Image: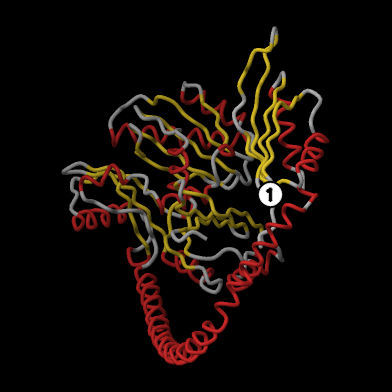
Amino acid sequence: MARHSITGLRVRDTFLEWTTLGSGKKGIEVLAARQVQLEGDAATLADPVHRAEAIRLQCPDLTGPVTIGLAPGQMLMRVVELPTTDPVEMTDMIKLQVDQFSPFPEDRMAVSYEVLSATETTCRVLIAAVPKEQVESLGELFRPVGVTIRRIDAEIMGWWRLLADHGAIPAQGRHLLLLLEPSGGVWIAVQDGLPQAVKAISPIEGLTPEEYAEELAGDMGALIVSLDLERGVVPVGGLDCWSRDLDTTVIVARLQQELGHTVRLQSLEVLPPLSEGLARRMLVPPFAAHVRAQGIRAVLDLVPAAWRTATTSQRFQKRLILSVGAALGLWLVVVAVLFVGFQWNRLHLNRLEARLVELQKSADDVRRLQRQIHSFETYLDRQRSALECLREISAVLPKDVDLTSFQFKKGKTILLRGEARDKDPIYDFKKLLDKSPLFKSIEMGSTQPSKRKDLTVQTFQMNVQLKEDKP
């Protein structure tokens, strides 16, 4: 696995989808991707302990740091404009905003935000709030599996990452995006290429297509009215409906009637998995370019600070123990090896020097004799004689190829020249020579056209390397 890698994870009850991305030579690369429907009794898997055990057994390749996305229906979200870019003032203002739209007490909520855009004095942020017990349940589920939760993100931001990479975010004006699956979805209002408002959509379960279409039309109307009141009246330029595993015929017709515009129907299947979008957000934050100039670095992350402290402490202790143990062990091994090696090498060197003096003259005589014998055998070897090589070449020579020159150098090379009416027989001839056991390699020279009376032929040259036995 790549050194810098992250896994995006989507969890739906007993369904898991994950994608692991890494930084490679060609940029961000997909290292692994998988979808798993946990097998087992539904009542048993409803228990977090048994579900964690099922994940551990059925998803052994789900390892390393992960970023998990929460569904829109699991969190409260709001896009707001803040009249400041000071982090302390922003935190206080965000607390006030959460108090307004959250039905739960502040001490029971986990809150995070992401800066979508910023100027010198203002910024637009997406605020997300979820019950703390929901966050803790994720930790209890994946802690026994051995998976480290690096970030708790929002699925909507993963979809935004994929849509942006796909070039599906309108750059100018106000537009609506509808992301729809059987398990629910989300409305996203886009203004000049940035999110302006978001609204979760409930699942279709228990509703007829007509009832669901009416509910969506009502949500869309309420969203447009809210935008006009809070952001100013701007005509809606269009609506893109991204869906899968749903018959949207009735829905699209009702939304077109309500909006007065043609609804563009898109398939979520053309996009990578949502888990890949979550992982990409870890490697390439989508709104970094908008806010980097103001020195603001705030991305959505609902992981409790206590988790990070515990993880950092455990990682540091583990690395410290391993480093000290490894350093001490390595030092002892190096000292022992150096001492033993020095003594043995000194003794062995003395023996070799004495033996070398004795054998040097005899070895030189033997090598000289071997070279003479090899040279003599080469010239006596009929298997590699000029006649045998010519026979081998003639046996595979295509009828459309004529040899014009055969220059043989015993034990080394053969220079072939010839011609043919076309280049194809020449290359076929080379391929046949490549398969011959007599020749080590065939070096093909350039082919050039040449005139022969009224014909144009292709002349060629090949340098054939003969196999030889080294002494």
**Quadrant assignment for the C terminus:** bottom right
User: Measuring 82% from the left and 38% from the top, which residue is drawn there?
Assistant: 391
Please provide percent x and percent y for residue 223: 40, 36
Badge 1 density bin: few <14, some 14–19, many ≥20, Cα 10 Å: some
Q: Secondary structure at mark 1?
A: loop
Q: Residue at x 75, y 42 (%)?
A: 386
Q: Position of residue 358 (x, y in %)?
A: 55, 84
At a point 36% along the width and 77% down the height, the residue shown is: 316
- Name the residue that disc number 1 marks: 411
Rendered residue at 35%/34% (across/down): 193
Tell me residue 252's x, y (percent): 56, 28
Drawn side of residue 239 relative to residue 85, left or right = right
Of 384 and 324, nearer the camera is 384
On screen, residue 182 above or below 66 = above
Percent across and percent down for residue 354 are 51, 87
In the rendered structure, the answer to whether residue 319 lies left or right of residue 218 reads left
Kindly indicate the quadrant of the structure image that contains residue 327. Answer: bottom left
On the rendered structure, is 378 left or right of 304? right
Whether residue 271 is situated above or below residue 282 in the rendered picture: above
Query: Is 144 in front, or is 363?
Result: 363
* Residue 291 shown left or right of residue 381 in the figure: left
Instruction: Identify which amino acid the numbered label 1 is placed on.
Output: Gly
Q: Classify 216 as above or below 403.
A: below
State the residue in front, 289 or 446: 446
